[in-house]
Image: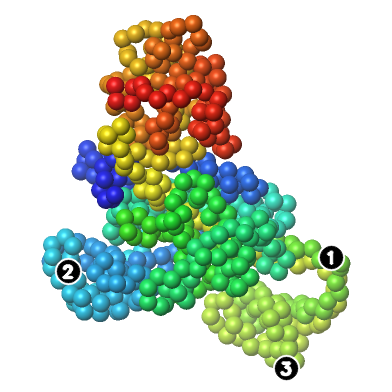
Amino acid sequence: MAGSDLIELAKRRGFFFGSNGAYGGTAGFYTFGPRGAALKRNLEDAWRDRFTLKEDNHEIEAPTVMPEAVFEASGHLEGFDDMLVECGECGASHRADHLVEDATPIEDAETLSGSEIESLIHEHDIACPACGTPLAGQDVEDFNLMFATNIGPGDSKPGYLRPETAQGIFVEFPRLKEYARGQLPFGVTQIGPAYRNEISPRGGLLRLREFTQAELEQFIDPEDDAPPLERVSDVEVRLYPATEQETDGETYLDVTIGEAVAEGIIGSAWVGYYLGVAREWYERIGVDMGRFRFRQHLPGERAHYAADCWDAESEIDGDWIEIAGFAYRGDYDLSKHGEYADDTFTVFKRYDEPRTVERATVDPDMSILGPEFGGQAKAVGEALERLAERDPDAFDDDTVTLDLEDGETVTVDVDVANFSIEETTETGEHITPHVVEPSFGVGRTVQTLLSHAYTEDEVDGEERTYLDLVPEVAPVDVAVFPLVSNDERLVDLADRVAADLRDRGSAVSYDDSGSIGRRYRRQDEIGTPFCVTVDRDGIEGEGPESVTVRERDEARQARVPVTDLAEEIDALLGGDDTTFDDLLERHDSVETDVETA
């Protein structure tokens, strides 16, 4: 399947299409049509079921606009960049590392420096995709991906559209820990939009400027908290470790999660646990496991604070696409916000038994510090307290040298500090939790499902295209047709059947336009798993009213009494392992009828 075939089907059948087409379109923005919005919603509900409900986590919904201070603390203002190269002839801007990846065998050019990218552009004579002018000699610059805005009128505060949903969780940690009663571990999830001013949006839903993330921030005590690894220890995964990426070719390791953690291939048991959970979830929603892997970040890709990072990748049109990331982030996020914010980003960890410890303390004599240092006296006192906590031995000398927060250095007599060592009894300590983060790209997963479900075959000698979507995510559960639209008896029964199925919670599509064969094809192309047809054979004769039920993948049909229909459809859709074969054991098969009528 060519990627263009899928994009054309997605547009024609209402899955997704470029936004603002009436005004020429806007690169990097896509609208989900009726079928795509339903598929996306079902996907999000499946993610929520597995990563929020079944993991007993909390879910929040935070604003998409946040003040500048948040991103100063998180590091996004300084380090959230991509490499940009601008054509000197036509002025078009391009993602420099992507140009290198497209023109060379290098797969992860983003790990290279700007100067290395410039050399590769020159070495391979890479040209501007827009006008064909060679880009050699053009500077490669860092481009910050944040969308800036102002919060409020007049003397407004600078703000940014969030580039990830995670920060909305981190900044609310002081309150969220209260909802968790201060007990670790606990997790917080969020599904919502994020924004990145991508240099070169491309690939349909694969690289957008506005996109949806589903993220989990798992807060843990690194010393005491362990994941329930036994739940996924036997899950088989295909791994592409960093060590294998540094050799020629692609060599995968097919192992269980338990083996990978025990052998140190996956460095964190928590990351391993969520890789196992994700592997089972991806299979559940219909990702082709033959086109799926977990790839470990190379050292140059991994953030400096991350102990271990893996990406879930799916194969689309011959390319491996990141669809989720799994990172052990340590205490970086909460420590940074604790440093910048006016709140506490720690939890109190109670000891099993009280402990008697020695603590260095100071009681600065402000009657001396005040006249000597004036307005700096308070800062000097605070510096003495920090020094006592950090380096008590410094008070063995007659004087101590202090570095104030404004950068000035001062010297103070030790006698003024009133330094002492005191025994205290402590019942616990404040610790900064570590964070394990599974982060899922919803749009990329939608495109993966459509790509992996796209199937071409023949039915009764006629070529057709259908989407092999699992019922849990399919945008329509069941379609209902009257065989013909000019027989009121068929139309009335079809209306009743559709209404009954809707009342039971099914997403129903009603279609009475065109031949029955064409109606089947329309439903096949949007992945509807079952079609119900009301025909004359089902309403004439002495038996109870009946309809035909057609399954999508093999176009098999069964005749089912109307009184049994809703229950049978519920069973087929309900995920309780009921199959169409089970249906055929209970009801008559329909060998010929209306597939091409």
Foreground tag (1 vs 2): 2
Residue at image coords 49%, 63%: 238
Are the two marked residues, 2 and 3, in contact with CB atoms closer than 8 angstroms? no
Q: In screen coordinates, is 172 left or right of 178?
A: left
Residue on which disc 2 sits: 127
- Mark 1, Cα crowd under 10 Å, few <14 / some 14-19 / many 20+, is few
Q: Gap in Å between the C-alphas at discs 1 and 2?
A: 66 Å
- Which of the 4 image quarters holds residue 222? bottom right
Quick one: label 3 or label 1, which is nearer the N terminus?
A: 1
**Image: 461 above or below 410:** above
Instruction: Tell which of 364 and 432 is nearer to you.
Output: 432
Instruction: Tell which of 208 and 521 is nearer to you.
Output: 521
Q: Gap in Å between the C-alphas at discs 2 and 3?
A: 66 Å
Residue type at mark 1 is Asp
Mark 3: secondary structure: loop
Residue at image coords 45%, 6%: 541
Q: In screen coordinates, is 45 left or right of 356?
A: left
Is residue 382 visible to the viewer in this orientation of the structure? yes
Mark 1: secondary structure: strand
**Image location of residue 503, percent across then percent down:** 53, 21
